[in-house]
Amino acid sequence: MTDAAPLPHEDPIAAAARAASELADLTGAAQHDLALVLGSGWLPAVDLLGETLADLPSTDLHGFAPPAVAGHAGRIRSIATSSGGRALVFLGRTHVYEGRGVEAVVHGVRTAAAAGCRTIVLTNGCGGLHPEWTPGTPVLISDHINMTGASPLRGATFIDLTDLYSARLRALCRQIDPTLAEGVYLQFRGPQYETPAEVRMAGILGADLVGMSTTLEAIAAREAGMEILGLSLVTNLAAGMTGEALHHEEVLEAGKLAAERMGGLLATVVSQL
């Protein structure tokens, strides 16, 4: 096991390069082509992506912390895709509410970029603001609102986010599944679920989905020059919409119920990248 997080004085790009070098040694793959980050509810879909050639704890690589959330496996797989490429799959992520700092949150994305990935698929489980999006509904992320009060960028690093979530990749997904909806994802810091008033505010701001991940990773991926596909799995209607309490268990259950559809969609997308 290596250090649980990049050291405060350590350059984050150097930390990612070190982790990518260790990844190459442990997987036997000098380079990976694309990366996927599987959030809450998505883990049952991973076995449909392709042949697993290597599977290791994320803590075997420099800078990765053990998982802190149920439903996040804390493992990394190297998978051979049907198109002949090599996919790097992160089974879980670090969240900003864990208190390990923004560098730890985006360390996986930067490691993927250092490993050669030029495309990344960021998934999450989230609350939906539209009643017709029942639990288990996949939604393409068309844009985001970052309400964490944080950024992975340092100093005067000005990055254009106009087309952050790739229109090309979203069009590809709609060719595969024309029923896919699109929406704006808003990230709160968490770990508490949103209040009904916060959900109403999110809707007024233009959000269709609310969650606790993804936006900081997307910004870091854009900084690294990666093409980004964001895909949310609606695991529950957001607070205040049903009058019922929210529970993490329903997030995981929705993922299990939607695993086949999610895995099939991701596998088809991956095969065409």
Image: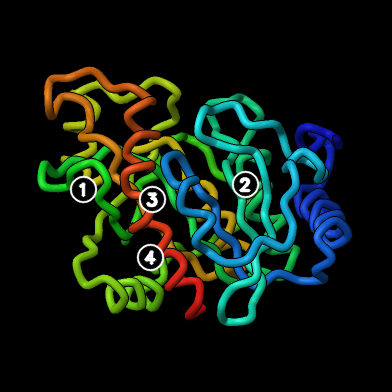
Q: Residues within 10 Å of mark 1 (few under 14, many from 20)?
A: some
Q: Residue at x 49, y 61 (%)?
A: 48
The image quadrant that residue 40 belongs to is: top left
Element assignment for label 3 = helix
N-term mark: 1 or 3: 1
| Residue 168 visible, this orientation | yes
Classify 32 as above or below 260.
below
Which of labels 2 and 3 is toward the front?
A: 3
Q: Vertical placement of 171 versus 156: above or below?
A: below
Q: Tags 2 and 1 in contact by the CB under 8 Å rule?
A: no
Query: Which residue has dot 3 on it?
Result: 259
Q: Mark 4 = which residue?
A: 265
The residues bearing labels 2 and 1 have C-alpha atoms spaced at a distance of: 25 Å
Nearer to us: label 4 or label 3: 3
Task: Indicate which disc, 4 or 3, sits on the residue closer to the N terminus.
Answer: 3
Mark 1: amino acid: Gly
Where on the picture, by quarter, is residue 196? top left
Residue at the image position 61 percent from the left and 24 percent from the top: 99
Spatial separation of the CA atoms under disc 1 and disc 3: 29 Å
Judge depth for marks 2 and 1 and give the one in front.
Answer: 2
Please give the label number shown on residue 206: 1
